Structure formats: structure tokens, C-alpha cells
Amino acid sequence: MADQDDRKQGRTEVDLADSRYSDGKVTPDTRIGVDEEGIFLYEKEGSSFTRTGERPDKRRSPDERPEDGIEVGFDGPADLTSYHETNWLDRVAVSQYMVEVTERHYPPIKKHLPLRLLLQYLLFNRHVVKYNTTWDGEGSPLPGTMLSWIAGRLDQYRSNNFRAEDMLWWAKDELFDGAFAWTDWKPHPHPRKRRPRRLKDVSIAPDVKDAAEWELKHPIEQAPSRVWFDNGNVCTRQSVSDCRNALSQSAQTYGAEVFGQKGNPEVPRAIQTYLNNLPVDGFNKVIRDHSEEAYAATQRLSDESPDGDRDLGVRHARATLQAVETCPKPFYEPKLRTPRLFAPRSLQLLNREVRATLVQDWIPLDLKSAQFAICARKWGVGPLLDFLEGGGDIWDELTSWMDLPKPALKKALYAITFGARAQWTAGRPPSTLNNALADEAGLSPENADQARDKLMNHPLMKKLRQARNRRIEEIKSKGQIEDCFGSVMTLPSQESGDGSRENTVLTLLAAESSAIEMQLLWPAFQEVIGQEKRCKIMLYTFDGIYIKPADPSREDTWVEKLQEAVNEEANRLRMPTTLELET
């Protein structure tokens, strides 16, 4: 972030206590600036600015030890059954050798649980994290919420009575002999938030690094014995069951709280209840039958990538597969800012190719061009509606136009429907779109920008973007939306209750279409609820489902039954989409 005095020109300074930001609220038009004095916020069309912090380079460097010393010897969390208080870690089952070699090189982890958990994150859990690098920076995140939870001081951290950085300095001294570096946290447009510190460098003992790489590349069944990394105890059936039950209880408790804040929407609650009550046997079976094939699929991803095993997508696939192997059954949770249900570090979020190998005995069904169909109808994009209703395939059309693979276009175009910038603004490229094309199609930054420009010049994409921008202005004007389940989401300037402080107009834009996506799939769930002995929906993937009929001879019957139910709902809602066998 460069110095930009000109952003204050003609604006009057307003103290934070007297400003619109005093309660921590920002708007979609809030901008952040930096000058020789520090950080300030202002509105794009406003006449004032407000200082919210010192200039970052005036703060102590992350390489400088705190002058008042550091606190060490934290006790860590009291309960390891599941890590339900943090989204950054999961329990990891590994070979006995993995624990032995790690304890040999890092003896303090035998005595200090927090150091052990931080090392677990660095070796395994951080690879599951997919972060928006254009917003949050490079390197694995080291958020204060995770560090304080690891230390057993989450409550103190939330009340600003714990310095999370002390955990890093303690690890630097005890584990890495100084060979551990991180970036400082960065400012955030929201005055009560920060972008987390990032891992800059860490030196892991070669034997430990090799052992961790082996774990990520092989099914746990290939290990002579199986133990929990966080305590070294044998991974018994009972301890696995305890972990699964804790995850289930956490999802239920948290889900009830979130649904309560959203007005207790009936359909999302019913879908969550159905999915989380599925028996575990079917999930355990896919691991028993196909885990080796799934790990082989991750190796193919590595072989196909120029970065090999260092490819972030490969590492994410392997770490997620490891989490799935530890707890095969997904447990879904609602979120305040979206109608969608999420099952962290599960089959739901596993790389598509790896997942297809693992659940090859299930039948995948998805909504054809769902987001385009929904947005075309909701935003009134006439040419796109005509194209889809006439039987046009948007992916065939755009892959032909672009000469790029569908996965790259799908990731980019979903970003457009969810509000990502499509053009350069104030000298900054539309990074979300460009990165999607670059990552999925292997394009250079320059070629990705050219591809993005070509994509946005397709006649249908022009109309889609224009309609999206109109809808964004409508949401700004109204200040809220009410989705098809009756849940109301408001912008900060219009908020009337908890849960909307962090909403943006793009949050509301995405939530609106995501709710309809779930509404379209609901008839499929209605068909199988109470019929679990005949057919189950095993997995929910936002715009699709995986099913498993009990009788293989009736697979076609169940596919047709669910397709008919969903397609009837799509016709009722006048959405030009159908439920199709995924190819």
C-alpha cells in the first residue's frame, strides 16, 4: 500500500469516536489510505476521512523481539476431542513413526501441547487452507484466533488480553532455534479487523519433513500403527467415534445458533439434519475400497503440475484427503453470510478429480449452469435467458470462444456472478478473475489479463455484467435482501440486528442466488427423506448431490425420480436449468 496523500485532499478529518466508523462499521464504498502519519478510512464519494492507526512501518518489525519480553509455558486447550472452537486445525491421525521422529527432533512438544499443535498446523493443517492471496497476502496464515486457541487463551484474546505473537516467539526459541519468520499483520478496511500474519519461512528437520510428506502421499492403512498427532495416543475405534460425535455435536450446536439468527429457515435446517444424521458405514466403505486410488489421483495431479508436490492445489488435495480419511463422514454447518451449508475439510471440498475416484460408486447429479440460470432470471438478462431456454450450453459456448478448459472458465465465471471485479480499477487489475484464469489454465499474469478481457467481451458476458451491476445498485439502495427462505440480510448501514456487521453488497448478491440454488435441490431431498433404506443422498456440493441407491438395479429409476422432482421445481420457478448426470 503506497503513500497516497492525494486521497485526503479536500476532505475534512473526523475523529474516530465521532465518525461513521466508531462502531466498527464500514460500507462497500469504504476505502483505505496511508500517508506519513498512518492509516485512514474514507468514503469513495465522501467529504471526510478518519485516522484508525499508525503507519505500519512505524510499528515494531515482526523480526524484533517485544521489548517487554514474551509470555511462555501456555497450557493449551483443555479438550482435544475435536477442535470445534477453531476453523484452522483438525485432528490428524498419523503413523507411529511420524510422532516418534517429530518428538526426537523437537523434544519440547512432548511437554508443551501448544508447541505440538502449532507444529501440527505447520506440517499438515495449513495445507488445507485456501486463502484469497490477492486480499490477504502470500504465505500460510497465522491468525491470532488460532494462536490464542492453541495457547488455551482464546477468551483472553477475544477481550484483547492476550498477545498472540508470543506463541510464535516461544516456538521460534524452543522448536526452530530462530529459523522461523513471519510477516506482520496488515491493516484491513474494517477498523476492528486485521489481515493475519503470514508464514514467511520455517526450517523443518529433513527427517520430519520427509515423514510428513510420506503421510500426505499414503493411506493411513499402509502405516503399521495409527496414532493421533496431537497427543501420541493410539487411534482406536472409540477415539475415532468420540471425535466424530464431538464434530456432530459441534455442528448441531453451532447450527442451531446460526439458524436462530437467520430466522430458523425450514429448508436449510431440514437438509442439514438429514445429511448430518446419515449413518457412517457408507462413508467408511469408500475409504476402505478406494483410498489407495484416491491417493494415486493426488499423485497424478502432482505429475501434471509444473510445481509437482509443491503445487498448492496438490498440497490442498492431499491434506484434505488426509482429513477425510481420519473422519470420512462430513458434518455440515450453516454460515451467517450465505444460505449454503459447509462441511470443512471433507469430501464436499475435496478436489473434484480426487473425490470422483473416492466416491466412484455413488452417482453424481448437478444443476446445469445453475448460477447462470438463476442470475439470468433474477437479474433479467434477456439474451442469456433466450440462450439457455433455447438449449444452449454456456460452457460449450465459452470454451469455444476462449479455447480454455471448462474448470478455468467455471471458476472465473462463478466469481463474476458473485460480484468479482471484471475490469481494472484505479490502476489495479481484477485479481480474483485473473488469478482464477491463471491458476486453472496455467496462464502467465499477462495472458490471464488478456483472457479475462476477451471473456468479458463475449456478448452474453457483457449483458450479464451490466445486469449484475444494476442489481448491485438496487441492493445498495434498498440496504437488504430477503432470500427465498425468508432470511433477511442487511448492509451495515441498515443493520437492525446481529450478524450483519461484516455483510457487503457482494455478500448479499451471492446469498440471493445461493438460496435459490438450494431451493432447486430441495425436492430431491424430499424424495429420499424417509426412504433411506432405498436411496440416500450421500453428499451435498452446493449445486449438486451424490446419491447411492440401495439396489443397483434401480439406479436409473432413482436418477429419473430425482431429476423429475428437481426439474419440476425449476419449471415452477422459471429457471432454465435441469438436474443432470455429472460428466
Image (cartoon, helix red, strand yellow):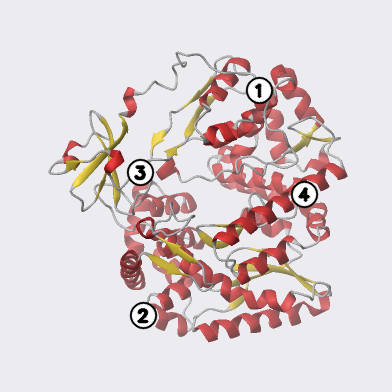
Considering the numbered disc 4 on the image, is that residue within a helix, a strand or a loop? helix
Quarter location, residue 98: top right
- Determine the CA span between mark 1 and mark 2: 58 Å
Q: Percent position (x, y) of residue 520? A: 57, 76
Quarter location, residue 281: bottom right
Front-lying residue, 100 or 76: 76
102 shown above or below 187: above
Q: Which mark is residue 189?
A: 3
Considering the numbered disc 2 on the image, is that residue within a helix, a strand or a loop? helix
Query: Is 96 left or right of 204, judged from the image as shown?
Result: right
The C terminus appears in which quarter of the rendering?
bottom right
* Image depth: mark 1 or mark 2 in front: 2
Q: Amino acid at mark 4?
A: Arg
The N terminus appears in which quarter of the rendering?
top left
Q: Amino acid at mark 2?
A: Pro
| Residues at marks 4 and 3 touching, judged by CB atoms closer than 8 Å | no
| Residues at marks 1 and 3 touching, judged by CB atoms closer than 8 Å | no
Which residue bears the numbered disc 4?
A: 244
Q: Which mark is residue 206?
A: 1
Seen at 64% across and 78% down, the residue is 523
Q: Percent position (x, y) of residue 469? A: 32, 66
Which residue bears the numbered disc 2?
A: 383
- Determine the CA span between mark 2 and mark 3: 37 Å
Sequence-wise, which precedes: disc 2 or disc 3? 3
Sequence-wise, which precedes: disc 4 or disc 2? 4
- Determine the CA span between mark 1 and mark 3: 40 Å
Considering the numbered disc 3 on the image, is that residue within a helix, a strand or a loop? loop
Front-lying residue, 10 or 297: 10
Q: Amino acid at mark 3?
A: Pro
